[in-house]
């Protein structure tokens, strides 16, 4: 029997999506693809066809609800329409972080995984789309033009991680599953793949290779390397400089109107962001 997901996690990148993904895939009533964390069918691999996509859900068991989490879906202009055409009854999960902190986390990820050597300011000049990814209201508007608001459960990262019990209850209610199936210990653990490493150049090369392997559907090779703990071979590095307060404030001004629009659209209480 062909199975397609009933819910999608759509973003935002660098906003606690790995933490949320871990909670979901450890619930016995849920099934998320085992061979690949982010399938990215609706933004990157749509041309491979629905049979390719269905292959990621061949292991769904009786009584399980299928879903997948690809944080780039929120930013993609093509994804909402493609999802509407294939999954018209889909439900959506999202978790949003202070847009400036999200951008800085994106920078830290590149420092670790892409061997980026410039400053945060350099990074924003080199990658202006990183700022654009924090304009959440415009991104959600594309989805709300196609799906009713009750199909969305949106968390504020800063609140969700501080109130894990409430987060699990909301997830359970939205997905129609028992909250007791979630592992409470995972809800209090930090999932963060931006810890600095010593040999960033080697890690960047390994990341590039893993991306090539996944494009050819050789996930088993990448997953075997992860299970073997090869990331530990790159060593622990020193943390770089933090985000300067004045720069954080000036960047925050760029998001002020966007945050107000987002509060009215969903609605959300974003007072924690202090923008």
Image (cartoon, grey):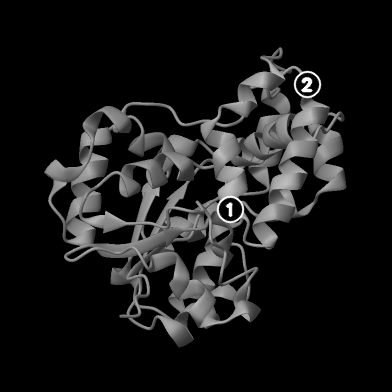
* Mark 1 closeness class: few <14, some 14–19, many ≥20 residues within 10 Å: some
Determine whether, in the image, residue 203 is placed left or right of residue 236: right
- Among the 4 quarters of the image, the one containing residue 151: bottom left
Secondary structure category for the residue under label 1: helix
Mark 2 or 1, which is nearer the eye? 1
Q: Is residue 248 above or below residue 135?
A: above
Q: Position of residue 245 (x, y in %)?
A: 67, 23
Instruction: Compare residues 19 and 197 and report the one nearer the observer.
Output: 197
Residue under the point 22% across and 32% down: 184
Q: Is residue 158 left or right of residue 112?
A: left
Res 194 quadrant in image: top right
Give the residue drawn at x 48%, y 53%: 35
Q: Which of the marked residues, 2 or 1, is nearer the chain's N terminus?
A: 2
Residue 199: mark in rendering: 2
Nearest the viewer among 229 and 147 is: 229
94 up-or-down from 190: above or below: below
Q: Position of residue 36 (x, y in %)?
A: 51, 54
Q: Residue 221: x, y in percent?
A: 61, 46
Disc 2 + disc 1, Cβ < 8 Å: no
Which residue is found at the position 30% from the left and 33% from the top?
A: 187
- Which residue does the image show at 20% across and 55% down from the upper left? 29
Q: Provide residue 165's location: percent of width, then percent of height.
A: 21, 35
* Front-lying residue, 261 or 179: 179
Residue that protrudes farthest toward the bottom in the picture? 85
Picture quarter with the N terminus: bottom left
- Which picture quadrant has residue 166? top left
Q: Secondary structure at mark 2?
A: loop
Q: Nearer the viewer, residue 155 or 73?
A: 73
Q: Using a 10 Å C-alpha cutoff, classify the residue at mark 2 as few (fewer than 14 neighbours), some (14 to 19) or many (20 or more).
A: some
In the picture, which quadrant includes the C terminus? Answer: top right
Please give the residue where the numbered disc 1 appears in the rendered image. Answer: 219
């Amino acid at each position: 029997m062909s199975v397609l997901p009933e819910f999608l996690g759509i973003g935002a990148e660098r906003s606690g999506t790995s933490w949320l993904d871990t909670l979901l895939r450890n619930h016995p009533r849920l099934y998320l693809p085992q061979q690949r964390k982010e399938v990215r069918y609706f933004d990157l691999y749509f041309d491979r066809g629905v049979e390719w996509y269905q292959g990621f859900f061949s292991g769904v068991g009786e009584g399980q609800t299928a879903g997948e989490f690809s944080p780039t879906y929120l930013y993609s202009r093509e994804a909402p329409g493609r999802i509407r055409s294939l999954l018209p009854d889909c439900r959506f999960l999202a978790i949003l972080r202070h847009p400036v902190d999200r951008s800085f986390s994106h920078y830290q990820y590149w420092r670790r995984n892409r061997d980026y050597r410039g400053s945060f300011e350099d990074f924003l000049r080199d990658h202006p789309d990183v700022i654009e990814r924090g304009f959440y209201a415009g991104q959600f508007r594309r989805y709300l033009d196609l799906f009713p608001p009750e199909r969305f459960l949106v968390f504020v990262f800063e609140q969700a991680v501080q109130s894990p019990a409430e987060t699990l209850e909301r997830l359970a209610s939205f997905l129609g599953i028992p909250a007791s199936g979630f592992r409470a210990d995972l809800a209090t653990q930090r999932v963060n793949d931006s810890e600095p490493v010593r040999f960033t150049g080697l890690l960047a090369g390994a990341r590039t290779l893993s991306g090539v392997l996944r494009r050819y559907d050789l996930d088993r090779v990448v997953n075997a390397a992860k299970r073997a703990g090869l990331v530990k071979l790159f060593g622990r590095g020193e943390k770089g400089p933090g985000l300067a307060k004045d720069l954080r404030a000036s960047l925050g001004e760029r998001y002020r109107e966007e945050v107000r629009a987002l509060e009215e659209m969903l609605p959300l209480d974003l007072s924690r962001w202090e923008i």
